[in-house]
Amino acid sequence: MSQNPSGGGIHNLNLPHSTSPVSNRITLSLGVACQVPDEAIAPSLLIEAADRAMYTAKGGGRDRIQVHYADCAVNLQSRQTLQWVSRLRDALEHNHFELYAQPIQALQAESAEPCFEILLRLCDQPGIVCSPGMFFPVAEQYDFMPRIDRWVIKHLFADLGEINSLMLQEAIFFVNLSGATFKNMEIASFIAEQLARHNLRPEQFCFEVSETVALKNIEAAAQLTRALKDMGCKVALDDFGSGLSSFTHLKKIPADFVKIDGSFIRGVVDDDMSKGVVEAIHHVSKIMGLQTIAEYVESRAILDLLNDFHIDFAQGYFFGPARPLVDTLATWQTTAYTERLSA
């Protein structure tokens, strides 16, 4: 059960919260859990139940109370979730994340600037690198994504501020923004602040929003992407084609790039429907003046078809896996990725 606090208190004080990535004012979200005492049930499980209820209250809109009525003798999966929550908190506090990058290869013409997608890895245990698929579901459920997005932007800009002068030429970096981040316009001010702090050009950055996120709140997505464009940054629609009304909503987002959903790229060689979808997305995108990027390019056969379709850019293991950011930039300056195209 979830309910809003009744009158008075913090809700009516309307206290400003200028440093929050998700709300302009202070709100109170409470998680409540109870359990009949049982020596077979660890107290930590009761704490976890209250913790989960609190994050459910936040996910439901904040400024509310969420009561957990289910038995607190949660299963192993729930205990693992609690461990991931603790690891994510520590990672943000102690900088256990690491930035990786993967090249985005121009296909139809020499790109004036090389392009890379920025990816995130969790490196909090010796010799183990965790991909986002392992921790993003928990991060989304427990409202970590706005903080993670800010961590990525802050550390990427700081790194580039130090090494930009050593690079042979500037590159364009594609950075994903989560659905939770798109709920608050303050991220635009944060990006502008970090750009100024590290003396970086906004044209170096392209911020990605998935089509699914954009469709959930098209007006908020349009407002934030317009703010990013006004700042001088670029915008890309990610996983395009996964929505049911893609072409209708595409014109509402002032994007520069369309990243075609990887499920269609993977099937483009053997599946006629995938071929038709890829061609259609590319055709409409070109009419609208947008450039297309194909993800999950893993073979020469896929690449050959994409060239036949005149797709603008490609990304995937055929060109190289994601590697630590500094290593990727060092490799790019000594080895031309285009060598793979003629291999």
Image (spheres, rainbow, N blue to C red):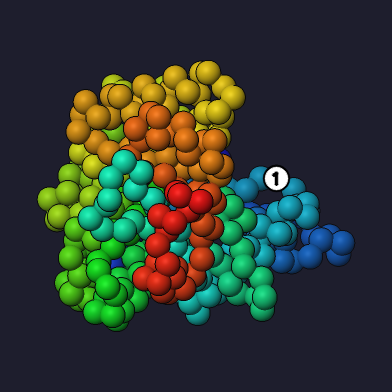
Residue 4: where, in percent of width, then height? 41, 45
Q: Is residue 274 above or below residue 83?
A: above
Residue at 46% x, 73% y is 327
Q: Nearer the viewer, residue 331 or 127?
A: 331
The quarter holding residue 193 reads: bottom left
User: Would residue 136 be found to the left or right of residue 206 on screen?
Assistant: right
> Outermost residue toward the right?
40
Q: Is residue 79 above or below residue 99?
A: above
Q: Residues within 10 Å of mark 1 (few under 14, many from 20)?
A: few
The quarter holding residue 253 reads: top left
Q: Which residue is mark 1?
A: 70
The type of residue carrying mark 1 is: Ala
User: Would residue 320 be found to the left or right of residue 34 on screen?
Assistant: left
Residue at 30% x, 24% y is 283
Residue at 19% x, 61% y is 202
Residue 117: where, in percent of width, then height? 40, 56
Residue at 40% x, 55% y is 338
